[in-house]
Each structure stands twice: as structure tokens, then as C-alpha cells.
Amino acid sequence: MKCVNCDKDAMYEYQISKENSVLYCGKDLPKFLDARRRAGLLKITEEFKEAKESALETLSASTTESIEEPKPVKKASKKSEE
């Protein structure tokens, strides 16, 4: 499914009525729908949902594997002027 304004894949579906809806990519999403998007009230397309889940799985796997304890850093001592 493509965005109504460009050739990118649609991410969001603005459902005007039960029969009519408009598809938008993230860049072309109208400003008046931004609050709904942030609140999670805007329907997302199936392709975007799959891509999002895949990205989250990749990120969660890479962060759990690469967590290391930071090494303490010694502070330089100040020499007093005599």
C-alpha cells in the first residue's frame, strides 16, 4: 500500500468513515493527525507493524548482548601550589 501523496509505503491509515480511508507515510501525515498518532489512536498499516516489530526485536537483541559494566575512571589529582 502506498501513500496518497507520494510513492513511499504507507505507515498510517486515516479512516474517514467505515468505507473510506486515506493512507499516509510518516512524512506526509497531516499535522492535524499528529496528536492522534502520538496517542496511538491512528491505525497503522500491516507492513509498518511488521517492520516496527522486526526493528524492536533487533534492537532488544543487540542491547542485551552488548551491555557491559563501565570501567571506573580515575580523576587526576590536583597538585597544590607551594
Image (spheres, rainbow, N blue to C red):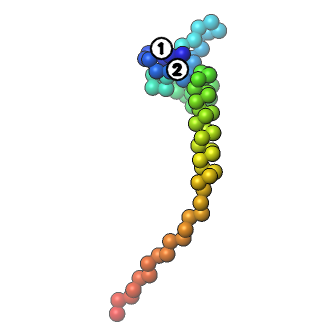
Question: In this orientation, which residue lies closer to the viewer: 75 or 51?
Answer: 51
The mark total stands at 2
60 up-or-down from 22: above or below? below
CB under 8 Å between callouts 2 and 1?
A: yes
Q: Is mark 2 on a helix, strand or loop?
A: loop
Q: Three-letter amino acid code at disc 1?
A: Val
Which mark is first along the chain, 1 or 2? Answer: 1
**Where does residue 65 sit, x and y in percent of width and height?**
62, 52
The residue sitting at 50% across, 21% down in the picture is 9
The residue where tag 1 is placed is 4
User: Is residue 30 shown to the viewer in this render?
Assistant: no
Position of residue 52 in the picture relative to residue 76 (left or right): right
The residue sitting at 52% across, 20% down in the picture is 10
Position of residue 78 in the picture relative to residue 56 (left or right): left
The residue where tag 2 is placed is 10
Question: In this orientation, which residue lies closer to the viewer: 15 or 62?
Answer: 62
The residue sitting at 45% across, 26% down in the picture is 27
**Where does residue 46 sit, x and y in percent of width and height?**
62, 22
Q: Is mark 1 on a helix, strand or loop?
A: loop
Q: How far apart are marks 2 and 1 (CA)?
A: 8 Å
User: Is residue 63 shown to the viewer in this render?
Assistant: yes
Most distant residue in the left direction: 82
Question: In this orientation, which residue lies closer to the viewer: 12 or 58?
Answer: 58
Disc 2 crowd, CA 10 A, few/some/many (<14, 14-19, 20+):
many
Q: Three-letter amino acid code at disc 2?
A: Ala
Disc 1 crowd, CA 10 A, few/some/many (<14, 14-19, 20+):
some
Position of residue 23 in the picture relative to residue 41 (left or right): left
Most distant residue in the bottom direction: 82
**Where does residue 66 sit, x and y in percent of width and height?**
59, 54
